[in-house]
Image (cartoon, helix red, strand yellow):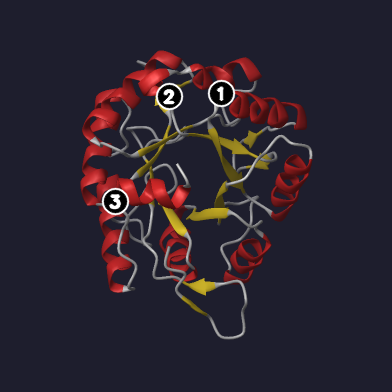
Amino acid sequence: MDQGYMLEGSSDLMLHRSKLIINAALTGNVPTKTDVPNVPITPDEIISDARKCFAAGATFFHLHARDDDGKPSCKREIFEEIVFGIRKHCPGSVICVTAGGRIFKTFEERSAILDIEGELKPEFASLTLGSINFPADVSVNSPNIIQSLAKAMLSKGIRPELEIFDTGMLNYAAYLTRKGFLRSPFHFNLFFGLLGTMPARMVDMCHLVQSLPQNSTWASAGGGKFQLSVNTAAILMGGHVRTGIEDNFYYDHEKNIPATNEMLVERLARLAKELGRPVANSSEARGILGL
């Protein structure tokens, strides 16, 4: 892979010319149709949005599921329906299913999606490495839950998408690696800009990136109005990007234009081209991630 060229004064951060992976976080747990009209809720809507984003350049999909009432669901069969549709219409794309603790608290609930097998088996599942205070609620991730999920992912051959919201979580990743719960190669999603998490400052982003272990790939995501600036910094620093309605409901800073997932992906693909980092296709994304 083309390693780009060094930024002056840094031995670690590089302005890469390697291809960019766009991760589309389509739905999440929070948005409702009432507040966010373009959020896809049903399996058909999620699959349709994935198709549009795939055509625009996304090759990685971070998936949540909803039940018939639009509430978050951890039911395996709903995830299987979504994964089937995306596999059919977005060939070669990388699938990550959520195992987050914002809504579901027990290991049994959060690990249900890890039992998906065969052609529908996801390449990744999210693993948040600590508890988080969001503006109105909490995502509880106890050491026992984190380790149990990590062990289950390891035993089933599903890679963890390591969710990092502060520096302590990165330290915990190193601890889990020493204990054998995590194995290289690692893929990190670095999240900035939510109240209660790392602020969306370049100094914080640079610190986390410089602290990542070897044999790592990484993407960055920003909450709300910080999404575009964080994504842009990641493109310049050689990382990859996560975008989508899960993280940001609006296209503009003034919150006048409701976002669609397709709009957000198209903007990043256009920006990446302007900055000299063409978007990776599915085969290239898999190669970069070591799949």
The amino acid on which the numbered mark 3 sits, given as a three-letter code, is Asn
Determine crowd level at label 1: few under 14, some 14-19, many 20+ residues with C-alpha closer than 10 A. few
Answer with mark 1 or mark 2, whichever residue precedes in sequence: 2
- Quadrant in the picture for residue 155: top right
At x 35%, y 15%, the residue is 68
User: Is there a contact, CB below 8 Å, between mark 2 and mark 3?
Assistant: no
Q: Which residue is mark 1?
A: 156
User: Which amino acid type is shown beneath numbered disc 1?
Assistant: Lys
Q: Nearer the viewer, residue 118 or 23?
A: 118
200 is higher (above) or lower (below) than 191: below
Q: Which of the two discs, 2 and 3, labels the residue nearer the N terminus?
A: 2
Q: Which residue is mark 3?
A: 281
> Can residue 70 be seen in this snapshot?
no
The quadrant of the rendering that contains the C terminus is top left
Picture residue at 47% right of the left edge, 68% below the top: 233
Direction bottom: furthest residue: 8
| Amino acid under disc 2 | Lys
Residue 228 or residue 271, whichever sits in front: 271
- Distance in Å between CA atoms under marks 1 and 2: 10 Å
